[in-house]
Image: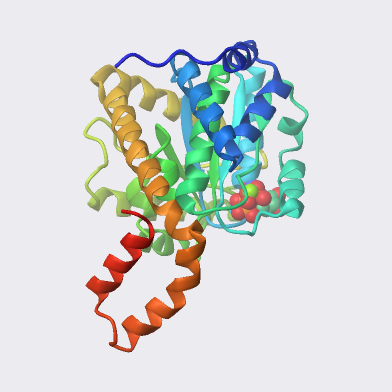
Amino acid sequence: MAAPSPPPDVERLARDIRSGERTVLSRAITLIESKRADHRRTAAALTQALLPDTGNAVRIGITGAPGVGKSTMIDALGHRLTGAGHKVAVLAVDPSSRRTGGSILADKTRMARLGNDPNAFIRPSPSSGTLGGVAAKTRETMLLCEAAGHDVILVETVGVGQSEIAVSDMTDFFLVLALPGAGDELQALKKGVVELADMIAVNKADGDNLARAKLAASQYGAALHILSPRSPNWSPPVITCSALTGEGIAALWQHVLDHQKRLTASGELAARRGEQQVKWMWTMLEERLFAPLRTDRALKAALPRIEADVAAGRLAPATAVEEIADMLGL
Ligand SMILES: Nc1nc2c(ncn2[C@@H]2O[C@H](COP(=O)(O)OP(=O)(O)OP(=O)(O)O)[C@@H](O)[C@H]2O)c(=O)[nH]1
Ligand SMILES: [Mg+2]
């Protein structure tokens, strides 16, 4: 089936985004984040129209425990990259309510250099909704940024919950930042984050921390050694770096480039992106199908009674499902 041709206003919007106009990009992202049905339709038409202009960026996910230095690292790396002629977009997936207005400001100050850089575009996490919803919006935002000519996308996520999986599902390269020492490495292992990592960078390897950082890196190296690698074409390196001094950041970027080169040559990158797209389709479809469960007024009103009846054994779960399906017209 051929893609439907977009309405004229979408066509214009798409053209302005392609030309790299920042204010238009911001407006389009707001459209994507909107919950209104008409906005959602326009946003879908817009991403469809821009699809041929996407996919040309290096997509990097960055995670790590709160305070590990993600924002500082993004600022340092991003600044370096814009200096070398790249256009960088910084996005975030944080479905918790933690990132209120205050911490967006805090983030902007920690990304002081990028915040004022005309070749960098910083967009905080969509603030509300399920993880699936937040991730979907960030994903679409990423596509818009690519269409606007950003060739490096950095997606920050907090080192808790399922958001790491969501971010690793939308990026080519998943960077895990770790702290020097104090059992942090085992904590990360437990969460399974290390299994997603394409590289582990022990940050804050500066001053008094240097020796401990090197020790932590060798422990991670040993831990990674016993895991089966995520890709047959890539063994995740473990490095030390300092977002504060900039030490190790050139090496970090070189690893990203090597990874991109190898996975492109083997065809793995294209395959991975294809799988991500299909997975994304299913996630969005599930979201869409679940939406009435959360929003249907009659159902909302009836649910406490239905749940109480099921809990008390007055109503069989299967009968309850029939009743709910009837209310939703399924
Ligand atoms: N010594 C040292 N301090 C650092 C380094 N990187 C970051 N910091 C400091 O660590 C603190 C937290 O840094 P952030 O960049 O905000 O950390 P984050 O991971 O983005 O934190 P959240 O977004 O709150 O999860 C700040 O005070 C930074 O100045 C580093 O390489 N060395
Ligand atoms: Mg941060």
Q: Residue at x 48, y 52 (%)?
A: 131
Q: Which quadrant, please, contains the N terminus?
A: top left
Q: Residue at x 50, y 57 (%)?
A: 295
Q: Nearer the viewer, residue 62 or 214?
A: 62
User: Residue 169 occupies which quadrant of the picture?
Assistant: top left
Please tell me whether residue 53 is drawn above or below residue 205 in the rendered image.
above
Q: Nearer the viewer, residue 81 or 1?
A: 1
Please tell me whether residue 240 is drawn above or below residue 67 in the rendered image.
above
Q: Where is residue 75 drawn, in percent x and y?
A: 66, 36
Q: Where is residue 312 drawn, in percent x and y?
A: 33, 89
Q: Residue at x 65, y 42 (%)?
A: 124
User: Residue 112 occupies which quadrant of the picture?
Assistant: top right
Please tell me whether residue 12 is drawn above or below residue 66 in the rendered image.
above
Please tell me whether residue 102 is drawn above or below residue 125 in the rendered image.
below
Q: Is residue 40 left or right of residue 111?
A: left
Q: Is residue 118 left or right of residue 165?
A: right
Q: Residue 247: in sight, yes or no?
A: no
User: Residue 323 occupies which quadrant of the picture?
Assistant: bottom left
Q: Is residue 178 left or right of residue 290?
A: right
Q: Which coloring applies here?
A: rainbow
Q: Where is residue 152 drawn, in percent x and y?
A: 54, 24
Q: Residue 58: in sight, yes or no?
A: yes
Q: Where is residue 85 drawn, in percent x and y?
A: 62, 14
Could you tell me how many numbered marks the image carries? 0
